[in-house]
Image (tube, rainbow, N blue to C red):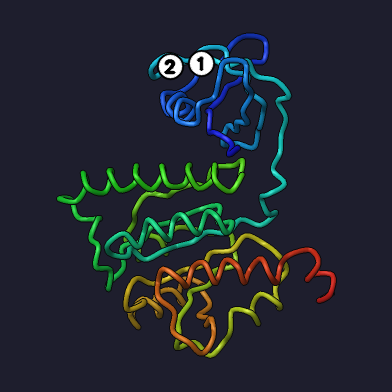
């Protein structure tokens, strides 16, 4: 059974009210009174919940075995700074980034972004997209048993994001780069990392120059040009493959 997101604070001494969303999931899965199901609070805590009541959009459960479990989180935080992609591509990107281990998603309005969400007239659409992506993050964490919800940063313009101080290894992925992502990962110890991916058509030459001036290294994923919805997943997976403890022992 998948785990369900139930925000804290939790109290094992008294019944805990269920959110309408959890109540709905329990009804769909035909969970009976007295049955138990796993929950997480989005901050690393997990527990067993025994269903006490369920009616309409409400219910309650008795919690037990509350503990911290963050074994699926890496000691280094991966930020995917993703150029806004059109259609439903961003939904797929967010979902797969969470499944593969990103801790932060930073949607960026880039020069070549088809989707426009940073103009004053776009505020309502932007808020709806943010809420929608947060829902995707939650569902993805439930599906892959992550216990810490990833952070979704506000939609920003590319240049504004570059101006923010970031204490991390900063990489912009470009098919024209002469340095490979793999070589940079091998040369650096595991640490917080930002993977910057362009929208359809990639980053413009001006954006790559701006990024370099802001301390980003321009790196490549290889000989083939990947779609924007593929590049982030491949890059995140590459980070894990090089920085996992077993590989670090071999490299050491």
Corner quadrant of residue 181: bottom right
> Where in the figure is residue 24, as x and y percent of width and height?
42, 27
Q: Secondary structure at mark 2?
A: strand
Residue 200's label in the rendered image is: none
For image coordinates 36% across by 59% down, the residue present is: 90
Callout 1 touching callout 2 (CB < 8 Å): yes
Residue 229 image offset from top left, x and y in percent:
41, 68
Q: Residue furthest left?
A: 121
Residue at position x 81%, y 76% in the image: 251
Residue bearing mark 1:
17
Instruction: Kindly indicate the quadrant of the structure image that contains residue 50.
Output: top right
Q: In the image, is 111 to the left or to the right of 10?
A: left
Up the image or down, 142 lies above or below 108; here it is above
Q: Which residue is mark 2?
A: 58
Which image quarter is the C terminus in?
A: bottom right
N-terminal-most mark, 1 or 2: 1
């Amino acid at each position: 059974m998948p785990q369900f997101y139930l925000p804290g604070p939790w109290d094992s001494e008294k019944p805990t009210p269920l959110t309408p969303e959890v109540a709905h999931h329990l009804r769909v899965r035909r969970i009976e009174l007295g049955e138990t199901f796993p929950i997480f609070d989005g901050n690393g805590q997990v527990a067993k919940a025994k269903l006490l009541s369920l009616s309409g959009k409400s219910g309650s459960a008795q919690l037990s075995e509350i503990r911290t479990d963050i074994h699926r989180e890496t000691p280094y935080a991966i930020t995917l700074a993703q150029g806004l992609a059109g259609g439903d591509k961003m939904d797929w990107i967010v979902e797969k980034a969470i499944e593969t281990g990103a801790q932060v998603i930073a949607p960026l309005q880039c020069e070549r972004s088809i989707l426009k969400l940073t103009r004053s007239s776009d505020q309502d659409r932007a808020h709806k997209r943010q809420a929608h992506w947060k829902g995707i993050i939650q569902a993805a964490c439930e599906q892959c048993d992550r216990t810490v919800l990833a952070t979704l940063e506000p939609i920003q313009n590319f240049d504004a994001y570059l101006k923010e101080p970031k204490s991390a290894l900063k990489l912009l992925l470009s098919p024209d780069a002469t340095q490979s992502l793999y070589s940079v990962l091998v040369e650096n110890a595991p640490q917080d990392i930002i993977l910057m991916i362009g929208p359809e058509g990639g980053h413009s030459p001006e954006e790559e120059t701006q990024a370099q001036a802001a301390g980003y290294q321009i790196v490549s994923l290889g000989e083939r040009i990947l779609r924007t919805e593929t590049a982030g997943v491949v890059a995140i997976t590459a980070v894990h493959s090089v920085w996992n403890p077993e590989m670090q022992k071999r490299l050491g």
